[in-house]
Image: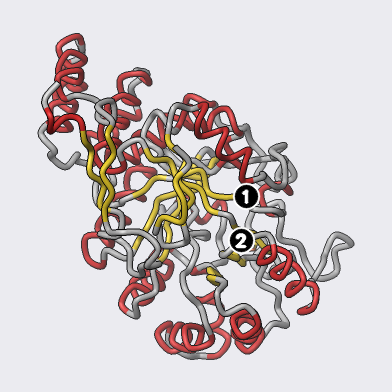
Amino acid sequence: MQGAELFHEVNFNSHTSKGNGGLKNSLRFEAPWLILKSMELETLLKAQKNVSLRRIGEKVLEGKRLSPEDALTLFNSNELAYIGALAEYVNRQKNGMFAYFVVNRQINPTNICVYQCNFCAFGVLKSDPRAYEMSLEEILEKVEETYQQGGREVHIVGGVPPHWKVEDYVGLVREIKSRFPQMVVKAWTAIEIHHMAKISKRSYEDILKELKDAGLDAIPGGGAEIFSERARKIIAPYKANAEEYLEVHRTAHKLGIPSNATMLYGHVETYEERVEHMLRLRELQDETGGFQVFIPLAYWPEGTRLGGKRTSSVDDLKTIAISRLFLDNFPHIKAYWITLGEKIAQIALNMGADDLDGTIEEERIVHSAGTTSPYKQSKEKLINLIRSAGKIPVERDTFYNIVAIYP
Ligand code: SF4
């Protein structure tokens, strides 16, 4: 073994906008097993009989960008092990053996929603007996509980109630930030921000500046669903469209607010529409570099007007792996354990994903659609999940700065 192969260097803050000052920019680990050898990949390619798949593998090995046609070829292939190995090769180039998690809490302040998307089992009308709305005190109690437990991120998303004004969204961020200045507030999806702009007849920039001044640190990726106009008309005809979603994120990035990106798959969309969705995200990322992570979200049909079937585990893993291969400018791919379940999320960590999300504490949106994953996960459990998947657990903050490594 050559000396150079004994180390793998990972630049932690190269793609983050904020440093926590706690750790150096890069760490070196004595671990010859960190990188899947290109030699191993070459052997895999030689054994690949399908010419198109082999050609895609060669591109991966040469570090070339995959085309939309390549991504479509992968979606139409059943060679999960091959696609997963290619994706894991790319992941290890980017993230070594690290797999990330965050100690956080999700808060869904209300399920009252004007948009009534057909794929959503969470949003209800105000008159619905299931409707709820948390008080400010209730929300602050949850934030305090998380803070006392060492959590440093609150992720706030919910329905879009007809009676909420811009001040309600901004005021909540301001209250949390003024009482818990160390807490990172990741709040309001592009859908909510578009709604605020619409009801107040103000620009996205204006709204985002006000939120930022109030203490907003990042915006989550929810609301992207699938960008295809055809599919969006069926699953979510009334809320912000693809252009509006992308414009909110573009504006946020311009203002120095990092964000995440998602894709809801497994409902009425085609593989072509999945690829088109990822292409539009890749193009925006080329332009701004403001996305931190891509999160493929499997559709859960229970309790929705749209109905349908759950995705298969093979589809879940293939979608994660292809996103890792296609979104070459995204530093991270998340295997969201709430929708995937713990076991599939562990496999995903070996097929291109490098992040499990977090402890969550409480989640109502996906649980309304039937997921049976627990509502929360202890930090120890997440560490064990990652370790037993063969990876090194790394606690991160919202911006992927390292908080602690659990070798
Ligand atoms: S997906 Fe979001 S916008 Fe659509 S109904 Fe559900 S909560 Fe409302």
Mark 2 Cβ and ligand 1 under 8 Å apart: no
Which of the image's four quarters has the C terminus?
top left
Q: Earlier in the sequence, mark 1 or mark 2?
A: 2
| Residue 76, numbered circle | none
Residue at left offset 69%, top offset 47% = 376
Q: Secondary structure at mark 1?
A: loop
Give x and y (percent) for residue 324. 32, 40
Q: CA distance from mark 1 to mark 2?
A: 9 Å
Circles 1 and 2: CB atoms closer than 8 Å: yes
Residue at left offset 40%, top offset 85% = 205
Amino acid found under the numbered disc labelled 1: Thr
Amino acid found under the numbered disc labelled 2: Gly
Residue 296, compared with residue 352, is above or below; it is below
Quarter holding ligand 1: bottom right
Residue at the spot of label 1: 359
Give x and y (percent) for residue 46. 14, 12
Give x and y (percent) for residue 44. 21, 15
Residue at left offset 64%, top offset 59% = 105
